[in-house]
Amino acid sequence: MSNQEQLTRGQQSLSSEPSSLAQNSGMPARDIIDDVLGDFFGSEDLPVETIGGEAQQRPELRTMRSEEFVRRFRQETGQ
Amino acid sequence: MRERIFSLETEYGVSFLSDRSTGDSGSGRGSGEPTKETLVSALRHALTDAVGLSESSFITTGAKFYHDVGHAEWAHPECRSAREIALYDKAADALLAYLLPRAQELLRADGFRGRLLVVKNNVDVHGNTYGCHENYMAERETVWLDQEDYLRLSVRYLVPFLATRLILCAPGRIGLGRRGEQGFAFQLGQRADFINAVVSRDTRDMRGIFNIGRENEPFSEGNYRRLHLILGDACMSGYGTFLKVGTVGLLLRLLEDLEIGSVPYLKEPVRAMHTVSRDPSCTALLQLYDGRQMTAIDIQRIYLEQVMRYAERYPTSDEERELILLWAETLDALQYNPAQLFGKIDWVTKKSVLDRLLAQHGMSWETPDLDKHPIRYKLQELDIQYHNVDPAQSLFYKLLRSQRGPEALDTLWDTESVRMAQSTPPLYTRARVRGAAIASARRTGGRIEVKSWTEMRIGGQRVEMHDPFAYFSAEVYALLKEGRLPSA
């Protein structure tokens, strides 16, 4: 099957679906949001300066505190 | 007009978080901080390697990617439906995310150490905005109205709809006013505070609810114009893009068949749009010209009812019927149970998470001096990271994947289709011809020049493509078959 045929098939199968809102289970349980927030801010309490070695050379965003992320994003990058 | 071309021009914010914490800001060329142009150039280089040509801004999907005044602009290929343009918009996000590591390698090779961020939002904290412009092929005049009267009618008819459609598709934003100077609060729209005119030709200083600046650049022959809307925000959720673009397409059909009914004219459309943006309850009353008051939901329902009556008398596509259903369900949900829209409409999703974070700390948006509390930084980080195109960092994708599985990329399209649309053009527009020519040149090492949306040069021969619906060109395929692609 060619790429284009696959794409056509994908479009057809989706356009024949019933309303996706009707299928939606609605607001997830509060604990799902809590899990995502917990995951997102999981390393929030870890000060940047405690991360050593290789990680310090290439810091992941989530090893920064929100304040640091926002400050850099605002003041240093112009976004 | 039963069929039309839809497209979007999505501008991405690009940023670079250098490894300052190490005391090593890099030894890059120039000042040590890469410019926006450098960042976009790295992305473009990576994109060219994957699906492009070194001397062209166009890629194998038929889209165009380039640097535009401090942002990365992705001008999408011509699409045949609202669902299709929603797919290509999402595929662009996914492709940029896929290319981020390669772009970072290129930056590192130039001495810039840090992390490249690509963010699909529409405002920065310095009071700059960048758009997600919408393009609709539309009839220039009708049997009964000349061009000028028809345009005037279009403005009168569409402005109340456009000023209130934020409730359907806005992304949500923390901050009131262009720089957030009017308050630390949540509002629906990101560009709403930058819209300062009902009608404009300009796209920078005077931004209109209805823009008429591209009417005479239809990129097609015949009785067509290009409706170019600049008021909208980019959606992370394909569901929002589908509703945003699809509802305009439906209303254009009513206009073109002159099957419009009376609509409530807003007394002050710009102020009304700002009011709608600052009213997550969707209950604010908007002043009408005739002295009455209506909510944004009331006004949207009037348009929806007209579309439903139209659909009873005129043939409609499966997609149009699906759009009508989704529009109705979305308005019902906004009125009676907005939580149903979690994971579908960006502003509802983002606000749910921000509200929950505040509640976890025993606070709300009404908490005094919220802007001085340290939690503001978490809220602001979430507000930015919601729009990160990198699924590993993005709040949108974390929420999506918690609902739909670890590989999910969209609320509307399956992951396989999104992956496919990263390199394959739309099937039934001229983007397919453009994409095929670029793909051929990539395979053969030959050289073509894509001069514009309507013109290519193959083997020294100029090929014009003025019909956007023409997805096959005997002339182009003959040239490609003849191997008239001189080596690059």
Image (tube, coloured by chain):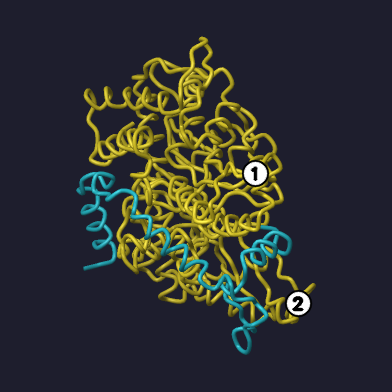
On the image, the x and y values in percent for residue B42 come to 60, 71
Q: Amino acid at mark 2?
A: Arg
Q: Is residue B349 left or right of residue B66?
A: left
Identity of the residue furthest to the right in this view: B31
Q: Which residue is mark 1?
A: B368
On the image, the x and y values in percent for residue B271 come to 60, 27
Q: Are marks 1 and 2 on the same chain?
A: yes
Residue at point 30%, 60% (across, down): B414
Q: Secondary structure at mark 1?
A: loop
On the image, the x and y values in percent for residue B320 come to 28, 37
- Give the color of chain B as drawn: yellow
Measure how far apart labels 1 and 2 are at the Cα level.
47 Å
The front one of A32 and B99 is A32
Q: Secondary structure at mark 2?
A: loop
The front one of B429 and B209 is B209
Q: Amino acid at mark 1?
A: Pro
The front one of B273 and B157 is B273
On the image, the x and y values in percent for residue B98 come to 46, 71
Can residue B198 be seen?
A: no
Q: Which residue is mark 2?
A: B29
Chain for mark 2? B
Can residue B200 be seen?
A: yes
Q: Is residue B182 left or right of residue B293?
A: right
Say which quarter of the image contains residue A2: bottom left
Identity of the residue furthest to the bottom in this view: A53
